[in-house]
C-alpha cells in the first residue's frame, strides 16, 4: 500500500504523489516545471502542489517523448492549447495527426536501417566485400558525403 494517502477528487497533489501516480521521477517533474511544460503552486511552506490535471499532461509529454517527438515540439504543442489547459482527446487527435507524417517517415527509415543493417550502412564506405555489388566504384560518393541509401 502507498505511504501517501490518496487525494479526493479535486484536491491538489504533492510532488511525491504526482511522481508516484505518473511514474515520472521527481527530478523530471522539476525539469518539466522549469521548462514550462507543467506548473504548480507553492504552499505557505514553499511546497509544490499540482492540480490533478497534471497527470494527463504528463502522460501526453511522456507518450510524445517515447515516440521520439522532441521536447521543443511537445512544448509548442502544449503552448498552442488555449489558456494552458490540459490536452483533451480532441487535442491529442489533432496534435498526433500533425506528428503522424514525421513518425511514418521515421518508421520507414528505421525499417530500412533494420533490413539493411547487416549488409550495408547505407553508403558503401566500409568496403565490406558486398559493397562492390551494392555501390560499385563508389558511385554513391558522387552524390555527396554520408549515408546515401537511407531514405530522407
Image (cartoon, grey):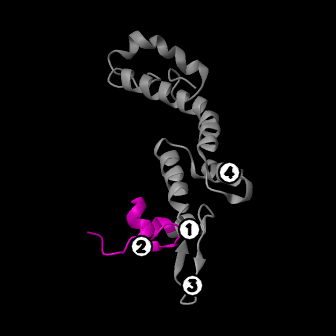
Disc 1, SS: loop
What residue is shown with label 2?
A: 16
Q: Is residue 4 magenta?
A: yes
**Image marks 2 and 1: residues in contact by CB distance under 8 Å:** no
What residue is shown with label 4?
A: 76
Q: Which is closer to the viewer, label 4 or label 3?
A: 3
**Image marks 2 and 3: residues in contact by CB distance under 8 Å:** no
State how far apart marks 2 and 3 are (Cα).
15 Å
State how far apart marks 4 and 2 are (Cα).
27 Å
Q: State the residue at coordinates (61%, 47%).
A: 88
State how far apart marks 4 and 3 are (Cα).
29 Å
Q: Is residue 110 above or below residue 84?
A: above
Q: State the residue at coordinates (58%, 32%).
A: 100
State how far apart marks 1 and 4 are (Cα).
21 Å
Disc 4, SS: helix
State how far apart marks 2 and 1 are (Cα).
13 Å
What residue is shown with label 1?
A: 51
Q: Is residue 107 magenta?
A: no
State how far apart marks 1 and 3 are (Cα).
13 Å
Disc 3, SS: loop
Q: Which is closer to the viewer, label 2 or label 1?
A: 1
Q: In the displayed orientation, state which residue is furthest to the bottom.
A: 45
Q: Mark 1 or mark 3: name the one nearer the start of the chain.
A: 3
Q: How far across and down, in percent of the image, does residue 131 sit?
A: 39, 16
Q: Mark 4 or mark 3: name the one nearer the start of the chain.
A: 3
Amino acid at each position: 500500500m502507498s505511504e501517501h494517502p490518496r487525494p479526493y477528487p479535486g484536491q491538489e497533489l504533492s510532488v511525491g504523489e504526482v511522481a508516484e501516480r505518473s511514474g515520472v521521477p521527481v527530478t523530471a517533474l522539476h525539469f518539466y516545471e522549469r521548462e514550462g511544460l507543467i506548473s504548480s503552486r507553492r504552499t505557505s511552506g514553499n511546497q509544490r502542489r499540482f492540480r490533478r490535471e497534471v497527470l494527463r499532461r504528463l502522460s501526453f509529454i511522456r507518450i510524445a517523448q517515447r515516440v521520439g517527438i522532441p521536447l521543443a515540439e511537445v512544448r509548442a504543442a502544449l503552448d498552442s492549447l488555449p489558456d494552458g489547459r490540459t490536452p483533451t482527446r480532441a487535442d491529442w487527435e489533432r496534435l498526433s495527426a500533425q506528428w503522424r507524417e514525421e513518425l511514418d517517415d521515421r518508421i520507414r527509415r528505421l525499417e530500412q536501417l533494420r533490413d539493411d543493417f547487416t549488409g550495408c550502412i547505407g553508403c558503401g564506405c566500409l568496403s565490406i566485400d558486398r559493397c562492390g555489388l551494392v555501390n560499385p566504384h563508389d558511385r554513391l560518393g558522387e552524390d555527396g558525403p554520408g549515408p546515401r541509401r537511407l531514405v530522407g
